[in-house]
Amino acid sequence: MTNLPYAILTRCLGALVLGLGLAILLTSAPLQAQSGVNREAVERQFRQWLDKTLWPEAARAGVSERTFRRAFDGVTLDWSMPELSPPGARPDRPQPQTQAEFSSPGKYFSEKRLATLEKDGRALLQKWSKTLDRIEKQYGVPREIIVAIWGRESHYGQVKIPHDAIRTLATAAFMGRRKPLFHAELIAALRILEEEHITHNAMKSSWAGALGQPQFMPSKYLRYAVDFDGDGHRNIWTSVPDTLASIANYLRQHGWVPDSPWGVEIALPERVSCTEEGPLQGRPVSAWNAAGIRQIDGRPLPNFPRQTFLMAPAGRLGPAFIVSENFYVLKHYNESDLYALFIGHLADRYRKGRPMVTPWAEISGFTRQDVRRLQDRLMAAGLDVGKPDGLIGFKSRIAVGIWQNRNGMRETCFPDRALVMGR
């Protein structure tokens, strides 16, 4: 048995804080109560922070004073943003989180949404076919994968991205709950302005500071965005060629293996334990074939040029897959099994036009906090859940399966409400 290369694992884990943190930020409610906060005083503190803390750091990063002053001319804090902790305010108690990753994974795959993305994406694959020909040749990433990410991130550029990136990032860096992360991203955004790739007014972002149609954080923009239309600017806001090529470059730079499928849906026999999943248990595809695993339509597994992995995001309570290292490359874009699966499945649908075969079981009735308590109990029983963060990742799924086996239960590798609540 072989393992996923250490470098890939480290990059996946490194993306965890950013990917999951942004998901929570985007879905959290704005701060409702800021009693006792003198906003005028906080705004004055903000201006002092800009002059005394941020400006020296920006200057060391190569940002000119002219760019810096113009960027913050008239900029005030955005008090409507979520997850704020202004100076002098008592932080609100975090609200229970109920995202798909730790409740009912099937909800992530809305058939209505997938069908719309499939239809629109097919038309755009035709419209931009010549550009995609060049991108595929240069980067070795399939056009369907590139377009699927474009669709998932901004519905092919149709979603409005209305926020002033500098104001958003400055607010999060000054009084957000993850200041160091956004502090670094704010410096990166100022470097983008310094290099004149986009004007301040045109540099729009999400609530989390993610930029343009591919939703790159500023540091990712500086590292991976490319000028593919040849106009001298890396424009991921309005240039489709730059957007598509930047996505492809991002994936290739993170290890995309050309000519390798991302994965296939399988029928998982009962004799194959669902605890064999995850990036630490790689095998050649021949080993899975020998174990009796077949594609969902009964055919043998296709040829994969390198090692492969069992991936079951809902254990035996939903579809299962044999995936390649390219699946884990997709997780660099967003550290979520479900996100990577969404991208791979949507890419397949552009060609095949069919949904997953195995249904998702309806799972509900617990929150992230409930899952965290379950992880603590599993750890107390000597099981490895990875980081006890309330998210049901592959280590937690394996731990649940081992616990079920120990206690004479059917091995599903996914908790139900009774298990989560300790019943």
Image: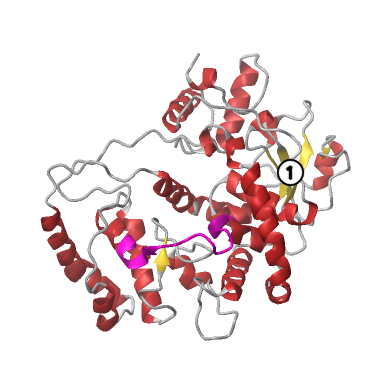
SS for callout 1: loop
- Residue 333's x, y, as percent? 55, 57
State left or right for residue 268 relative to residue 290. Answer: left
Identity of the residue drawn at 41% across and 30% down: 369
- Residue 295 sits in quarter: top right
Could you say which is closer to the camera, residue 142 or residue 120?
Answer: 120
Vertical position of residue 345 compared to residue 405: above or below: below
In the image, 51 versus 10, the foreground residue is 51
Colour scheme of the rendered structure: secondary structure
Question: Mark 1 is on which residue type?
Answer: Pro
Q: Quadrant of the N terminus?
A: top right
Question: Residue 384: percent from the left, percent from the top?
Answer: 53, 32
Q: Is residue 94 left or right of residue 321?
A: left
Q: Is residue 160 above or below residue 70?
A: above
The residue sitting at 59% across, 81% down in the picture is 229
Question: Where is mark 1, residue-wise?
Answer: 355
The residue positioned farthest toward the right in the image shown? 299
Write the residue at 64% across / 41% down. 278
Does residue 327 appear anywhere in the picture?
no
**Depicted 53 relative to depicted 27: above or below:** below
Tell me if residue 166 is in the magenta stretch. Answer: yes
Mark 1 crowdedness (10 Å alpha carbons): few <14, some 14-19, many ≥20: some
Residue 329: x, y in percent? Answer: 62, 56
Quarter location, residue 55: bottom left
Q: Is residue 405 magenta?
A: no
**Residue 143 locus on image (x, y percent):** 70, 65
Residue 41 seen in render: yes
Residue 111: quadrant of the picture: top right
Q: Residue furthest bottom?
A: 231
Q: Which residues are magenta?
A: 152-169
